[in-house]
Image (tube, rainbow, N blue to C red):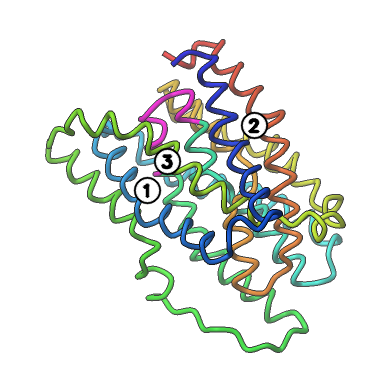
């Protein structure tokens, strides 16, 4: 893929849908209901199809077994750093819980997947799905209980819905995981993927980015977030400097594939994910903290970090 075309993709698939989502909210061109429907389509249809197609054509290598562990590690590193940073930062439990969720949860699935795909192609997108699967486990098994803990520690006495194992793992939002399993099975038993699906894959990646990032832009509320930019700014060095350095140095000791190393570097550098806002909304944590972290780290990533990674990777023989 030509470098100029890749740069166009960065704008068309990352910046433009975010701006449009915010514009649609301001002009009331998109309702809350239709925004939610867009998220459902992204999860149930587009992400599931991409999971099947990417894993179907993925060369199965033993070193890939380490990727889920890196997915968890890339949540632990910023989470641990933010925990120590937050000890004297927030006295309000709802703010602290939202801050920690913003540190732990990253935009590896949508933003990381697209950024890696732009540079390395299909295989990199599949790598991000493996890492994203592990980070979904972190979301369900750690972040949700953590959010519930901070909610209960707050002064709020509102009754909250009880989470069960079935509600967390046996619901329609897990359909992309089913697609992942189907893709692995098709690949393992040697069923060749028809050429038609290879042609479909590229436009699906771009559709996935738009259907995920338009709702993200729609959720931005600058007026409520402005007082939290200062207190969340330390997530910029934590998530965009410390985590990628540690993650990349560890990855070099395990992986030899340059595309895989480059993908891990990108995934270690991605900003706060939209799931931080979803977690805060679900448990009544402070939405403005997670929103400020999402906007701040995303802007720095798109304007500073990803351009640096893009030119460093493409000029240092990491792309074949």
**Picture disc at residue 168:** none
Disc 3 secondary structure class: helix
Q: Residues within 10 Å of mark 3 (few under 14, many from 20)?
A: many
From the viewer's perspective, is residue 190 above or below residue 176? above
Magenta stretch: dominant secondary structure: helix
- Of mark 1 and mark 3, the one earlier in the sequence is 1
The residues bearing labels 3 and 2 have C-alpha atoms spaced at a distance of 17 Å
Residue contact at pointers 1 and 2, CB within 8 angstroms? no
- Of mark 1 and mark 2, the one earlier in the sequence is 1
* Residue carrying label 2: 245
Asked whether residue 61 appears in the rendered view, the answer is no
Q: Is residue 141 magenta?
A: no
130 on left or right of 223: left
The residues bearing labels 1 and 2 have C-alpha atoms spaced at a distance of 32 Å
* Residue carrying label 1: 46
- Of mark 3 and mark 2, the one earlier in the sequence is 3
* Residue carrying label 3: 67
From the viewer's perspective, is residue 25 above or below residue 77? below
Q: Residue drawn at (41%, 56%), measured in percent from left and top?
A: 41
Residue nearest the observer in this picture, 225 or 13? 13
Mark count: 3
The image shows residue 184 at horizontal and vertical percentages of: 24, 44
Disc 1 secondary structure class: helix
Residue nearest the observer in this picture, 159 or 217? 217
The image shows residue 276 at horizontal and vertical percentages of: 62, 58
The residues bearing labels 1 and 3 have C-alpha atoms spaced at a distance of 23 Å
Q: Residue drawn at (75%, 59%), measured in percent from left and top?
A: 289
Q: Residue drawn at (62%, 36%), measured in percent from left and top?
A: 15
The image shows residue 187 at horizontal and vertical percentages of: 19, 38
From the viewer's perspective, is residue 34 above or below residue 52? below
Give, as a single range, the part of the protein colored magenta: 116-129
């Amino acid at each position: 893929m030509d470098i100029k075309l890749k740069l166009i993709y960065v704008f068309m698939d990352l910046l433009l849908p975010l701006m449009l989502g915010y514009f649609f909210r301001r002009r009331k061109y998109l309702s809350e209901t239709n925004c939610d429907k867009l998220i459902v389509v992204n999860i149930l249809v587009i992400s599931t199809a991409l999971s099947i197609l990417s894993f179907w054509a993925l060369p199965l290598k033993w070193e890939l077994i380490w990727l889920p562990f890196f997915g968890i590690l890339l949540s632990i590193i910023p989470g641990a750093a933010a925990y120590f940073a937050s000890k004297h930062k927030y006295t309000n439990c709802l703010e602290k819980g939202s801050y920690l969720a913003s540190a732990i949860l990253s935009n590896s699935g949508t933003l990381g997947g697209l950024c890696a795909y732009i540079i390395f192609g299909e295989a990199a997108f599949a790598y991000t799905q493996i890492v994203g699967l592990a980070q979904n486990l972190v979301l369900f098994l750690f972040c949700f209980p953590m959010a519930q803990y901070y909610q209960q520690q707050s002064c709020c006495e509102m009754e909250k819905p009880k989470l069960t194992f079935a509600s967390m793992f046996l619901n329609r939002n897990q359909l992309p995981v089913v697609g992942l399993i189907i893709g692995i099975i098709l690949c393992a038993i040697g069923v060749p993927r028809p050429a038609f699906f290879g042609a479909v894959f590229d436009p699906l990646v771009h559709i996935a980015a738009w259907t995920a990032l338009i709702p993200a832009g729609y959720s931005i509320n600058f007026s409520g977030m402005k007082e939290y930019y200062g207190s969340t700014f330390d997530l910029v060095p934590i998530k965009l400097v410390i985590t990628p350095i540690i993650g990349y140095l560890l990855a070099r000791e395990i992986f030899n594939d340059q595309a895989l190393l480059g993908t891990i570097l990108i995934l270690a550098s991605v900003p706060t994910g939209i799931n931080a806002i979803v977690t805060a909304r679900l448990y009544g944590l402070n939405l403005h903290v997670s929103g400020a972290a999402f906007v701040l780290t995303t802007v720095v990533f798109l304007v500073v970090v990803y351009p640096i990674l893009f030119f460093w990777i493409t000029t240092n023989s990491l792309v074949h």
